[in-house]
Image (spheres, rainbow, N blue to C red):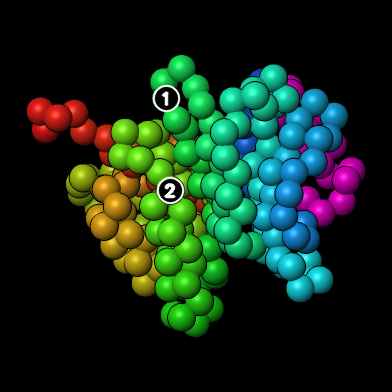
Amino acid sequence: MLEIGKVHNVIQEMNRLSIQVMGVSECRWKDKGQRDILDKTVYYSGITDGSNLNGVAVMIDQSIKKAVKNFLPLSDRVMLLQLNLDIGTLNLIQVYAPTAEKEDEIIEKFYEDVSRVMEVTRHQDVTLIMGDLNAKMGQCQSNKWMGRFGLGERNERGDRLLQFCQENNMVITNTLFELPKKEAVYLEITTGLQRQNHSKSD
């Protein structure tokens, strides 16, 4: 998404599909900040050493820009955008996880960063982690943290993701429903997580 022409194409598709909020992984934008482009505002967090690697972003329609209450660009792989909505605070954590061949230390640093961002949120908020988590969850019986519609065989990164969900009471949402095979293969990698909120009676 580095080139401005590609951004315009993305915005055109967002408008065609009436999408008001969209996360982007590996946007390859440098530094951190926000830009107004056409009728969208892009909040982005990229690398600061001059290279065009990694990078995450959240694009929102300018009609909801007033709802933004906090933007935390933590790293080139993790950022947080908080919105005040009628339902309360919506926390959007956009991520781009290291690929499976990266060293374990890099993977652990990524999850440490996500955990740091989670500390800014409150339990009563609606918290979504979206983006490319580079993990295969495999098929299994439904449990508290995932559904039965994962694909293939779980890999080590899938084990680490499940551990994170267990530690943070998150559910892997794209394993909860069945998709056509082409879409499912894509969503197996671009996993979404949502915090499970429980009432006081639970």
Q: Residue furthest left?
A: 201
The residues tagged by marks 1 and 2 sit, at their Cα atoms, a distance apart of 15 Å
Q: Residue 152, can we see it?
A: no
Residue 179 place in picture, x, y as percent: 45, 37
**Disc 2 residue type?**
Val
**Disc 1 residue type?**
Gly
| Boundaries of the magenta span | 1-17
Please tell me the numbered disc located at residue 106.
none
| Point 51% across, 41% down: residue | 92
Say which residue label 1 marks.
88
Question: Relative to the observer, which residue lies in front, 106 or 99?
Answer: 106
Say which residue label 2 marks.
120
Residue 122 place in picture, x, y as percent: 35, 40
Question: Relative to the observer, which residue lies in front, 137 or 21?
Answer: 21
Question: Relative to the observer, which residue lies in front, 191 or 39?
Answer: 39
Q: Quadrant of the C terminus?
A: top left
Q: Residue 7, can we see it?
A: yes
Please identify the quarter of the rendering in which residue 66 is found: top right
Sort mark 2 into few (<14), some (14-19) or many (20+) by Cα contacts within 10 Å: few
Q: Secondary structure at mark 1?
A: strand
Please identify the quarter of the rendering in which residue 112 is found: bottom left
Chief secondary structure of the magenta portion:
helix
Report if residue 6 lies within the magenta region. Answer: yes
| Point 47% across, 38% down: residue | 91
